[in-house]
Amino acid sequence: MAAYCADCGKMIPDTAKFCEHCGKAVIKKHGGNITLCEDGKYRWVYELNLFKTPTVFLLVWKILFFVILGIFAFTNIVDLIEWREAFLQSFLNNLKVFGIITLGMTVIVLISYLIYAALMGGKYCVMFEMDEKGVNHRQMPKQAKKAHLISELTRTAGMMSGSLSTTAAGIGAARTEMYSQFSQVKKVISYPRRRLIKVNGVFQRNQVYAEREDFDFVANYIKSRCPAAKKRGKQ
């Protein structure tokens, strides 16, 4: 791992905390984009192209899909108890409704996502902070302001229309920071091609991104510090 002075730029020993030439604090680079700061935390910035990378869209879609699927399953269980003889017909009718609602939901989520991506300038810029205890995902300040504005608009629209789901979506959009404590992580899944590492807890789903040259380091660092987590990798 190379080390250089933040002030004079001269190379210094990896173990040095201060420059032997000018006395300034040392900044250490790991790979091309990750900085090991004086406080012992690794920091890097990642810019996600919202139009080319479907990760955010798929996350929202999956949440809503499983909510609809749960309602579909519950409805069929009730129908099975009450209408055993006519259950097949009832199931087919419910399946048709399920398909229509899922299709409609997909269209609405896609349109909403494209509007969101346009408002954010097509980019999601985030800073990551990582140390021995956990990893933090923080949206960059200018984009965080946009996210808060979108949240307020969505929340207001939800309250005016009486829509619980819209209001909840607005509250969720306001969250611009997420911290995962390694000791509480239950699953770590790495996706090298998407440069994505999912760090999942019981009630928390964090997404960590890293450039190709930094990906293996970040993924291995996280996995080695999550003793209770199941680890696996995908393409």
Image (cartoon, helix red, strand yellow):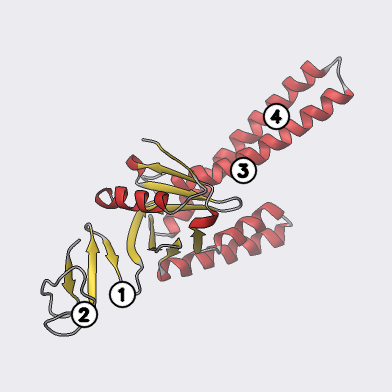
In the image shown, does 178 or 58 lie closer to the viewer? Answer: 178
Q: Which residue occupies 55% across, 40% down?
A: 107
Mark-to-mark CA distance, 1 and 2? 9 Å
Which mark is drawn over residue 64?
A: 3
Residue 142 percent location from the top left of the image: 41, 70
Residue highlighted by disc 1: 38
Q: Is residue 136 visible?
A: no
Callout 2: SS:
loop
Q: Amino acid at mark 3?
A: Leu
Mark-to-mark CA distance, 4 and 2? 66 Å
User: Mark 4 or 1 closer to N-term?
Assistant: 1
Residue highlighted by disc 4: 97
Residue 34 percent location from the top left of the image: 28, 61
Q: Residues within 10 Å of mark 3 (few under 14, many from 20)?
A: some
Mark-to-mark CA distance, 3 and 1? 42 Å
Mark-to-mark CA distance, 2 and 3? 51 Å
Residue 175 drawn above or below residue 65: below
Q: Residues within 10 Å of mark 4 (few under 14, many from 20)?
A: few
Residue highlighted by disc 2: 18
User: Mark 4 or 2 closer to N-term?
Assistant: 2
